[in-house]
Image (cartoon, rainbow, N blue to C red):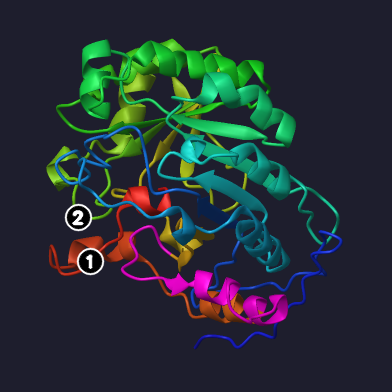
Amino acid sequence: MAQSLPPIRVLPSTGRAPAALDLRDVRDRPLRDLRISVTDRCNFRCVYCMPKEIFGRDFQFRERDELLTFEEIERLARIAVGLGVRKLRITGGEPLLRRGIEDLVARLAAIRTPSGEAVDLALTTNGSALPVKAAALAAAGLQRVTISLDSLIEERFQAINDVKFPVKRVLAAIDAAAEAGLGPVKINTVLKRGVNDDEILDLAEHFRGTGHILRFIEFMDVGATNGWLLDDVVPSAEVVRRISERYPLEPAAPTHPGETAKRWKYVDGAGEIGVISSVTGAFCGDCSRARVSAEGQLYTCLFASSGLDLRELLRGDAGDEELSGILAQHWGLRDDNYSEIRAALTPGSRKRIEMSYIGG
């Protein structure tokens, strides 16, 4: 039975929150990670995320006044930190398309936990604008970036992003992030059988010894527009086996509880890789993540069907104390475990939010 939690008062004037409750959902999972989408727009049309036939020239994105303002995002983040959030991740769409994103980074970087510590502040990007923004983002207080890179082969990479964006510019973005101190840089590769799984070893070799962390993600059934089939999934166990045959790997302990990626270190000390196995190795049991869409819908699962409208509350008469209580009770009712029950569901029986809408 869901617990009823008292509200928590947040003090925006000091940027600090009082001691947080040990907030838990129905499955005894804490709230630790808030992923905030700042735009539903992207300049890529990756075939597994925003296929051009759906997100074409006539597709209606959100108007500017529909998006949460930076002030609203900051307020929400402060309240969430008061409820136990310790990691804030800025996502999209492509978050670097949001004008003035450095200002939002500075606002979020100023937030402190009840003990006075900074939160872990990261951003996920396709890298297209990073070479010109990396230094400013770092100066504003951003700590780390995760960059998407699904192929090292030029023709293939352009086919995947479907806007002819060159791979060398993403590689330049990785270099720019490292030079700006936004590291260790994480590189996310979504694997799809018959599309790019033949590059597993090439990708591993490219980033071995660089200090960057390459992470292979199983192709997921997020949303309803990417044509997902189970046969297209490359299991993480296969990825680890194929790399380890050339460069022996050993398991590494998680950096934080509830991490999505399982860490594997090269035995020879040349760094590490990660695998994210939401299809073959569901990690619902310790998932501590909530997501906010660009226009303020709160989703408690990547595979959610509906959300809680926070924008109406933020723009209404609700004070911080009331908002905190609503968030606490909403999390207390959370019972999501889609990846664990996926196989038992009838295909197409459940509507799912598109990944581009809530940032993955």
Q: Residue at x 61, y 19 (%)?
A: 178
Residue 247 shows up from this direction: no
The residue that mark 2 highlights is 224
Q: Residue 4 appears at what percent x and percent y?
A: 60, 88
Residue type pointed to by label 2: Ala
Q: Residue at x 59, y 66 (%)?
A: 30
Q: Nearer the viewer, residue 173 or 113?
A: 173
Distance in Å between CA atoms under marks 2 and 1: 8 Å
Residue 217 left/right relative to 51: right
Q: Which element carries disc 2, helix, strand or loop?
A: loop
Q: Residue 119 appears at what percent x and percent y?
A: 72, 49
Q: Check disc 1: other Cα within 10 Å, few if <14, some if 14-19, many if 20+.
A: few
Indicate yes or no whether the magenta region holds residue 78: no
Which of the 4 quarters of the picture holds residue 341?
bottom left
Q: Is residue 50 above or below residue 139?
A: below
Q: Which mark is residue 351?
A: 1
Q: Nearer the viewer, residue 337 or 61?
A: 61
Q: Are marks 2 and 1 in contact (CB under 8 Å)?
A: yes
Part of the protein shown in magenta: 301-324
Q: Nearer the viewer, residue 85 or 294?
A: 294
Q: Residue at x 27, y 38 (%)?
A: 235
Q: Residue at x 72, y 36 (%)?
A: 141
